Image (cartoon, grey):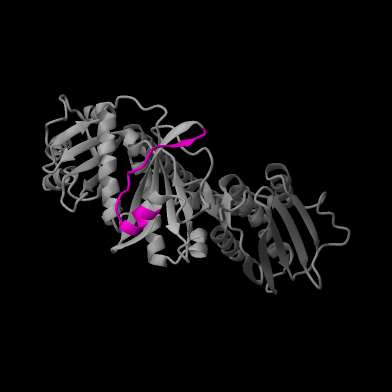
């Protein structure tokens, strides 16, 4: 719609915003009218109309099999459009049109804003299935007529009341028509069922909706008074009411077709099961976070016990093995600590990498500085946990075997994302400027327990590749290529 309006018309941005607000609301008008809606706007030179939006009803057959958006019609070809635009009134005169052997009643509704007519809504009703209307259909049609008059007067949609039609109740979910005093004149079967879910034992017709709703909701002191006013439909509001283990979502629409308040429409939907599932998900998320928190605490306890045991061992080799185990357990604990603070099983790995780097740097025999460049991004837990262990082993290996006591040096971790959303990959390098690899060293066969762990995790668990090569100039460079899930852009 933006492109069509800016290309063909003289409307300003504020006018365009009003049309967007109208289009966000007009599914209601279409459903209540049982009719298709097409929004026509005069072109810049005033000789034609361009259709910028279209809506089909959920409550009846369509009048247009094809998409009308983008069509241009010369002025004069459709006199009802001209009359609505020039005279600023709803035009209903004229005989039905025949489209593909289907009779269609056409009406034109001017779209007014700040006293100016911006365009015209063509309301097209398929008359092929017309029959004697029921009480529900009569209420729909009367409500549609009131809304159409409000559009023609510039009183609908309501400024500042942007509605999410996917989340808001629709006419078919449940509809209540109130008079000017808030007394229920009509309640659809779905609306009545929703109120029965709240605990209503009687009919709604003839009762004050605000007072009835406040009585069904749990007593909350002053809130009851405001709830009664909201449910009376005096202001355009959307709210929820919970009672008797049921939850209904309501949307109030004041009706002022001639400027005076004549009543209200209240659309409502039973969202009991939806809210129950949401609460279950919240409980599940909280439980998962608590599990991660407890796992982190248990791992820290294990690390403390290993550290205590290491102090009691006289063998230097045994003590060193236990200290390595402490760091391995610690790297896993860092991941679980991060997961305990998130709502899903994905973590921002850059913080984890920095903490692992700082943890390993503390045990360096020399004066080795560690730094990270690039970003790992957000990773799934099943990748983050083994990757934290791999990073711990590689950093520990670089600092212990690349530098002697008192030697200065640098270990740099570089991370880069590559590939497409379907084939996203994480490229990681760990490079030091230390002694380098021993003569004839084969990283795929040789190596200590740490390198064996790295190979197993990278190739077996994460499905990636691992290589260790001499760095350009001096030192050693380890390269990892790991498949990951793409970040949401």
Image: magenta residue range:
82-100
Residue closest to the eye, 260 or 178: 260
Residue 168 location in percent, x, y? 34, 43
Residue closest to the eye, 418 or 187: 187
Q: Can the viewer see residue 450?
A: no
Q: Can the viewer see residue 149?
A: yes
Q: Is residue 444 left or right of residue 37?
A: right
Residue 348 location in percent, x, y? 54, 56
The quadrant in which residue 353 appears is: bottom right
Residue closest to the eye, 194 or 339: 194
- Whether 350 is drawn above or below 105: the answer is below
* Residue found at the very far right of the displayed protein: 440
Q: Quadrant of the C terminus?
A: bottom right
Query: Which residue is rendered at x = 41% and y = 39% of the image?
Result: 281
Residue 468: within the magenta?
Answer: no
Query: Which residue is rendered at x = 11% and y = 42% of the image?
Result: 181
Q: Is residue 370 left or right of residue 463?
A: left
């Amino acid at each position: 719609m933006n492109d069509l309006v800016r290309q063909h018309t003289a409307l300003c941005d504020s006018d365009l915003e009003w049309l967007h607000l109208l289009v966000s609301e007009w599914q209601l008008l279409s459903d209540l009218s049982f009719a298709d809606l097409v929004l026509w706007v005069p072109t810049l030179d005033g000789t034609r109309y361009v259709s910028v939006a279209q809506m089909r009803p959920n409550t009846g057959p369509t009048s247009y099999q094809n998409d009308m958006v983008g069509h241009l019609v010369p002025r004069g070809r459709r006199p009802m459009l001209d009359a609505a635009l020039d005279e600023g009134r709803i035009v209903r005169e004229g005989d039905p049109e025949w489209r593909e052997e289907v009779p269609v009643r056409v009406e034109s509704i001017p779209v007014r804003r700040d006293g100016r007519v911006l365009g015209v809504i063509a309301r097209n009703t398929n008359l092929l299935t017309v029959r004697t209307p029921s009480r529900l259909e009569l209420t729909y049609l009367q409500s549609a007529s009131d809304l159409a008059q409000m559009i023609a007067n510039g009183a609908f949609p309501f400024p500042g009341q942007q509605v999410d039609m996917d989340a808001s109740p629709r006419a078919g979910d449940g509809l209540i028509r109130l008079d000017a005093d808030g007394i229920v004149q009509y309640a659809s079967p779905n609306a009545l069922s929703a109120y029965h879910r709240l605990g209503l034992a009687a009919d709604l017709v003839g009762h004050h909706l605000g007072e009835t709703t406040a009585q069904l909701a749990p007593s909350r002191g002053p809130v009851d008074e405001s709830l009664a006013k909201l449910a009376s439909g005096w202001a355009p509001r959307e709210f929820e009411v919970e009672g008797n283990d049921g939850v209904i979502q309501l949307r109030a629409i004041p009706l002022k077709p001639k400027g005076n308040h004549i009543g209200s429409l209240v659309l409502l939907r039973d969202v009991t099961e939806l809210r129950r599932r949401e609460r279950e998900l919240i409980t599940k998320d909280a439980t998962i976070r608590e599990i991660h928190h407890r796992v982190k605490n248990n791992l820290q306890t294990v690390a403390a016990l290993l550290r205590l045991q290491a102090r009691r061992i006289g063998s230097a080799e045994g003590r060193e093995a236990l200290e390595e185990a402490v760091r391995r357990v610690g790297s896993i604990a860092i991941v679980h600590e991060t997961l305990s603070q998130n709502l899903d099983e994905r973590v921002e790995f850059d913080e984890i990498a920095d903490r692992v780097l700082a943890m390993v740097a503390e045990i360096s025999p020399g004066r080795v500085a560690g730094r990270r460049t690039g970003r790992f991004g957000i990773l799934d837990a099943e990748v983050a946990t083994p990757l934290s262990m791999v990073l711990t082993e590689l950093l520990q290996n670089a600092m212990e075997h690349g530098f002697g006591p008192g030697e200065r040096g640098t270990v740099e971790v570089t991370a880069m994302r590559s590939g497409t959303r379907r084939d996203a990959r994480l490229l990681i390098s760990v490079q030091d400027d230390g002694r380098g690899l021993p003569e004839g060293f084969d990283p795929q066969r040789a190596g200590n327990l740490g390198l064996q762990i790295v190979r197993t995790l990278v190739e077996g668990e994460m499905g990636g590749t691992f290589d260790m090569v001499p760095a350009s100039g001096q030192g050693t460079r380890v390269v990892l290529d790991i498949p990951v899930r793409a970040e949401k852009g």
